[in-house]
Structures are given as structure tokens and as C-alpha cells.
Image (cartoon, helix red, strand yellow):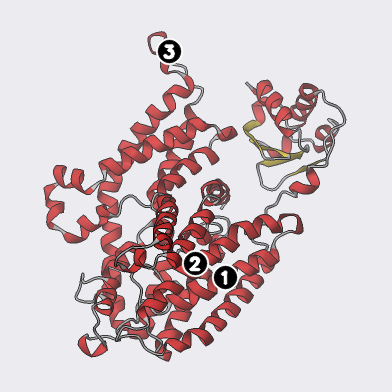
Amino acid sequence: MKFLQKLGKALMLPVAVLPICGILMGIGYWLCPATMQGGEIQGVANLIGLFLVKAGGALIDNMAILFAIGVGVGMSEKNDGTGAIAALASWLMLTTLLSTGFVTTIMPSIAEDATKTLAFNKIANPFIGIIAGIIGSMCYNKFKDTKLPDWLSFFSGKRCVAIVAGVVSILASVVLLFVWPLLFGGLVALGEAIVGLDVVGAGVYAFLNRLLIPTGLHHALNNVFWFDTIGLGDLQHFWAGETSADVSWSLGMYMSGFFPCMMFGIPGAALAMVKCAKPAKKKAAIGLVASAAICSFICGVTEPFEFAFMFLAPGLYVIYAALYGIFTMITVALGFRAGFSFSAGAMDLLFSSSLPAAQKIWLIIPLGIAAFAVFYFVFLFAIKKWDLKTPGREDDDVEAEKKIELANDDFAAIAATILEGCGGKDNIASIDNCITRLRLEVKDITAVNDKVIKSAGVAGVMKPGKTSVQVIIGPKVQFVADAFSKLCE
């Protein structure tokens, strides 16, 4: 759990980039519907819309790379950029060695298996990006101080980090070469089994679709239900102008349930997050989740919202996925049918409403109101009940701690006293800092003496974990952290 929390904080850096994508794409699709549905693009408004869609899409389409770099920086000690370089090197190596063209060259038999080929077609996904970021940051933390023989001294220290990350990435690629298609194929088989469950199956599919978003493996299920992999193809048949009479299932049942959730459920959940945010952080929370909610409503792009909390509060994300499953079963049972060519936003709802398979479109109003209310109250209850760290609810009371003043500006002396109180440098496992706190991991928590640490003139000491010590210093924490690090060298 501690690792996931650290990963979640690291992901907040790239996630903070995504809201602008949603705003640009939402406005762009509104100005230029042809960008989504096809057709001629003429006139100033359409060209502006196309420009905005492409600008926002440039980041959404490369979100996995952003995650690789963000995790590489965020999980590296002192947030050193060397970790990001190593993560990018890892990403490039992983996606090249696991690309369909290369994999089918070294293992021609894969080209004969459609499922395995599809698996490697989808290798450039957020899950691989996060793996690359973890590889880059861990290699930095482990090998940043490596000393090589004199004839290799140029590659000592930080310069060897990317090299080590490359070696680790090669080994990871070998493992994924065999593991990834098995995972992907297993999910395809699961999708085939779900088809026979009718309405319940549609709900199970929607639940798994959201649950697998972080790994990119949702593409395996999507391929079963939306496209003609096993003779289904809900999306293809819907947009071909067919009806349920032309197929063996209720056409649109594997897409319809996403509309109330993405258009109304996510805004409800976002409002709950804003409601639960600390007063000093409410504006920041609004900036992060409000634009994501608008993006989801207009064009069904949900990643800016989902990645804002899935690693900070993984339990809440499971609940979020379960709500999709529940609303999909309700939506399908009531007979609402709509389809999407891009995602379940207002634009696709508008376009699909005129197709023959569309049914009871008016139900989006009561279903949407219900989804907004249920998502809002469920998120509100869960966040408060379990004190979940959604955007705006981070542990650090930064605004209050920014006003803290140290007893003096002798940072070396302050750091020395803190180090003494922590049991000396031999007891220090890692050093980090946020805006106002010195964050330490110690080997033996019983060797930590709070009174000695407080005698340095700091504002307080916290022990949030069995090996974690946080010293509340205030806005000058960086100077103390630098002096502390020098003492530990």
C-alpha cells in the first residue's frame, strides 16, 4: 500500500497535464464534430476545432510516455531528472522490443495467432509506461552512487543509471514477451465466457473494462465485445446501421451503460471530491477534477479523472468500476441503447441517437440524474468514511506549514540535531522532502528520539509508518534537507 501511495503521488505530475487536454478536446469536438464522426472539414470554426482536438490529443495519445517520465521523476530520490531519462530509455526499449513487427520477426509463430498479435499491437499503454518509470526510478535510487574502475570512470554515478535501466528493460522485455500475451489471451477468453450472461454479462464487462484501465488490458475485452473477434462486434454493427434483428444480441448493450456513468457519474464523483477537499486545497482540487469532468461529459475521455485518484485511493477505484457495472445492468435492462465511435460522451450520444439501433434515448435524463446522485453520495461516503487521499486531501497541511518559521537559519546545525535524533546516519534508509516536511525512512524506528529532533527548533515530528519519520520544518525545508543529505554522505 505504501508503494502504491508513493506511485500515486508520482503520477500526479503527469496527471496535472491532462486537464488541459480535456478542455481543448471538448471545445474542439464541439466546434468540429467531423473530427469524431468523419466528413468534410470546412470553415474557420471547424479548422479551429480540428486544431484544438489535435493539440489535446497529442498528450492524451502519448499519455503512457508522460507516465513513464512522471513516475521516473516522482519516485526518484530528490525527484532527480536522471530517473526520468532512465525511464524514457526503458520505455523506448520496452516498446521497441515488444512491438508487433519485432516480436513477429524473432518469433514468427506469433504472427499466426491473432490474439497474440493484437496483444503486442497494444503494448504502448499506460501500464508499460508505469513499469518503465518504476525501472528508471529504482535504477536511479540503487545505482546513482556507483563507482566504476578508472577506465570506466566516465560512466560512474548518475551516468550509469540509464545503462543499468536498459539492461533491466531487456530482462523485463523477455519476461513480458511470454507473460503479456498470456494475460491478454486470458482476458479474451474471459470476454467470450461473459457473452453468454446477457444483462449480467454486460455489467461484468463494464466493471472489468474500468478496472483494467491502468494496465491497458481492457483492450483485450474491448476487442471481444466491440469488434468482430468472435462474431460479436457491438460497435461495428451499431454504426453499420443495423438493428438487434440483424444480430444475435441486443445491439448496443455493451456500450450503452457507459453514457450515464461518463456523462453524469464522473461529474458527480468530481463534485464529491471537491466537497471533501481541505479548504486551503479546494481551488487546486477544482482545477484538477472539474476540467476532467467536463472533458468526460463532452467527449467521454475519462483518463484525466481516473488517473487523478486510482493510485491514491485504489479501493475507491474498485468501487468506481463496480458502479459502472451496476449502472450498465440497469441501463441495459431499461432498454436505453446508444453507441459510440470514440467514447461515451455527449457528442457521440448526439450522433448515435439517429441510428436505427438507438432506443429510448430520452432515458439518459433520469439515468443521468440517478448516476450523478449515486456517484456523488457513494464517493462522498467512501472518502469521508475511510479518509481517502483523493485530490485536495493530502496529509500535508501545506498552507498552514508554509507559515512556520525555524528558530534560526543555521541549517547545518538544525540538520545535525535532527540526524542525532534519528539515531545517526547509519539509521537513515532514505531522504526526501515535500514543500514543508523532511521525509525520512529509518532502519530502526525505536532509535528515533522526538525530543532531540524538536530541540532543533522544528515545528513537530510525525511517524506515519513503522519506518517513516516526517519532520515539520516549514518553507525552508529544502535548505535543511540539503544539509541533512550532506551529513549522510
| Image mark for residue 296 | 2
Q: Position of residue 365 (x, y in %)?
A: 52, 85
User: Does residue 350 sit above or below 394 in this rendering?
Assistant: below
* Residue 389 seen in render: no
Q: Residues within 10 Å of mark 2 (few under 14, many from 20)?
A: many
* Mark sitting earlier along the chain (3/2): 3
**At 51% from the left edge and 22% from the top edge, which residue is drawn?**
145
**Alpha carbon distance from label 2 to label 1:** 8 Å
Q: Which label sits in the foreground, 3 or 2?
A: 2
Q: Position of residue 417 (x, y in %)?
A: 79, 27
State left or right for residue 175 relative to residue 102. right
Q: Dot 2 lies on which element?
A: helix
User: Marks 2 and 1: CB-CB under 8 Å?
Assistant: yes
**Alpha carbon distance from label 3 to label 2:** 51 Å
* Mark sitting earlier along the chain (2/1): 1
Q: Position of residue 477 (x, y in %)?
A: 73, 34
Q: Nearer the viewer, residue 335 or 80?
A: 335
Q: Which residue is mark 3?
A: 153
What amino acid is found at the position of numbered circle 2 in the picture?
A: Ser
Q: Which residue is mark 1?
A: 267
What amino acid is found at the position of numbered circle 3 in the picture?
A: Ser
**Alpha carbon distance from label 3 to label 1:** 55 Å
What amino acid is found at the position of numbered circle 1 in the picture?
A: Pro
**At 20% from the left edge and 73% from the top edge, which residue is drawn?**
230
Quarter-of-image position of residue 171: top left
